[in-house]
Amino acid sequence: MEHWMKYLALVLSLSLACLPHAALAWSNHALGTVLALGAMPEIRDASAVEVESLESFLAEEGVAIEQLLDEQEEFFRENLAGYPARPDDLRFVPTHQGDPRRRFLMALRVNPEIRLAYFVQGLPGTDWSAHRLLDASQVLVFRKLDIWREWRFYQVSPGDSVPALAVVASAADEPDYGHDINLFSDNPGDVGRRYDFGRQPFGDARFEYSSQAPFHIGYYHEDEVIYRSAPFLARTYPEMRVYQYLGLARFAFETGHPYWGYRFLGWGLHYIQDLTQPYHAKAMPGQGTGRLIWIALKAAVGLDADKRAAIERIANRHTEVERYQADWLRRLLHEGGQDSPLLRAYADSRTDGDYPAFDEDSLRAVVSRESYDFADDFDARIAHWLAGAQVRQGFSQGNTLAPLPEDGQLNQVLVRLIRHFGAHSRNAARATLP
């Protein structure tokens, strides 16, 4: 038994090593968030907020922040199974010497090298042309920035007045800018050895994006035999991030720091939105436990063709559907049409009340459960689309491969999932805003 369980763990670990390097989960989160929250009266009618430096926020509220982060740490130790406790020397103590910003980030156990630029994204319906355009390297920490060059980042400064929606929507994309990279002991740099998360549980360490995956994925509902074979699947931490950031957002609103309230809210929404993507909630959609065991048994006796095919299939479907959804959304926004089912789905609030009020259990019990239950059907729909695309796809002018064709049934599935994205974003915002 141990022999095939070892091979099952290998199949799962290799499939997760092939995750899309950026693991974007529904494209640019700022675009999705501005569409999902734009009609909420609590945000639409909110007063513009004054940009505040993080240093000012920490200086004014340092003692209370110290207490809040200690309370959060106590909650994690008591309520999150397998949680790796934060080393005590990382506590945020406002009277300690050194850069308070860096000490705060290390108390949160995020990458202390993140830029934390003061910026807003150039989103539909906004004109920031009077502000300086920032290069992507001033906003993100990654070495390879090609995929980010299409976003537009505009500088704002402490004291500027900014719409609340622009703050929260821009911030919702930020955790993909390097917050969660290099936090494990086998990653580059020094902080991974101090943070006590251990070795990176999955992902391909050759790619700088991959180390963020365990923070943006939540495998909470796999069969027990899967966890026994691959216990590393349980080492995922989006619950920690959502609790940290929404708690900080509530604190900032309550203490009169609305800019940081909206910015922390956006950070927390990011991880919730990630888990509305079924590939972020189930390790191998479309592969039942029995099928995975059979693949592992065959691999154990040297017949690994099914293993290689399964790994390639999952990676390809995840990558292609993310690209498809992103291209669809960008095309709609470029054309300026507002009557698309996809655009309406982000703002469709009819099912918001079907869910319980958002709380500390919602990410696991509601958001990821819903995505996990939908994962196999989603995977099958993608497979049907790709199979049809291979038949229909040809070469366009210039002898380049033509874009994958549109699929009406896949569009319907994506619209349903984007409704989940919007509903959970709004419910989390309602639970956090004053």
Image (cartoon, rainbow, N blue to C red):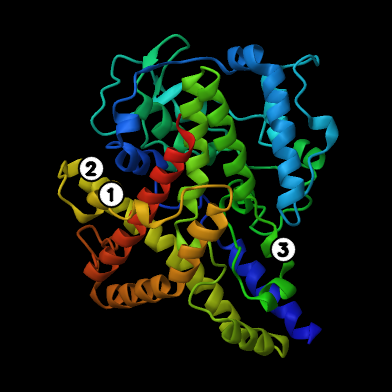
Which quadrant holds the N terminus?
A: bottom right
The residue positioned 57% from the left and 43% from the top of the image is 242
Which of the two residues, 388 or 251, is positioned nearer the viewer here?
A: 251
From the viewer's side, name the closer residue of 384 and 354: 354
Q: Amino acid at mark 3?
A: Phe
Is any part of residue 24 visible from this angle? no
Is 62 situated left or right of 196 in this image? left
Which of marks 1 and 3 precedes in the sequence? 3
Q: Residue furthest top?
A: 159
Residue 165 higher or lower than 291, as above or below: above
- Where does the C terminus fall, quadrant-wise? top left
Give me the C-alpha separation between circle 3 and circle 1: 34 Å
Q: Tell me the distance, in whole angstroms, between the alpha carbons under discs 2 and 1.
A: 6 Å
Find disc 2 in the rendering and name its residue: 333
Q: Which residue is mark 3?
A: 232
Q: Residues within 10 Å of mark 3 (few under 14, many from 20)?
A: some
Which of discs 2 and 3 lies nearer the camera? The answer is 3
The residue that appears at 30% across and 52% down in the rendered structure is 327
Q: Residues within 10 Å of mark 1 (few under 14, many from 20)?
A: some
Residues at marks 2 and 3, CA–CA distance in whole angstroms: 40 Å
* Secondary structure type for disc 3: helix
* Residue type at numbered disc 2: Leu
- Residue at x 44% of width, y 23% of height: 119
Position of 376 with respect to 405 (left or right) is: right
In the image, what residue occupies the spot 54% across and 67% down?
Answer: 282
Q: Mark 2 touching mark 1, by CB under 8 A? A: yes
Q: What residue is pinned by disc 1?
A: 329
Type of amino acid at the residue the image marks with label 1: Leu
When the figure is inspected, residue 215 is found, relative to residue 278, above or below; the finding is: above
Q: Looking at the image, do the residues carrying marks 2 and 3 touch, with CB atoms under 8 Å apart?
A: no
Going from the N terminus, do you reach mark 2 or mark 3 first?
A: 3
Could you tell me if the residues under marks 3 and 1 are in contact, i.e. CB atoms within 8 Å?
no
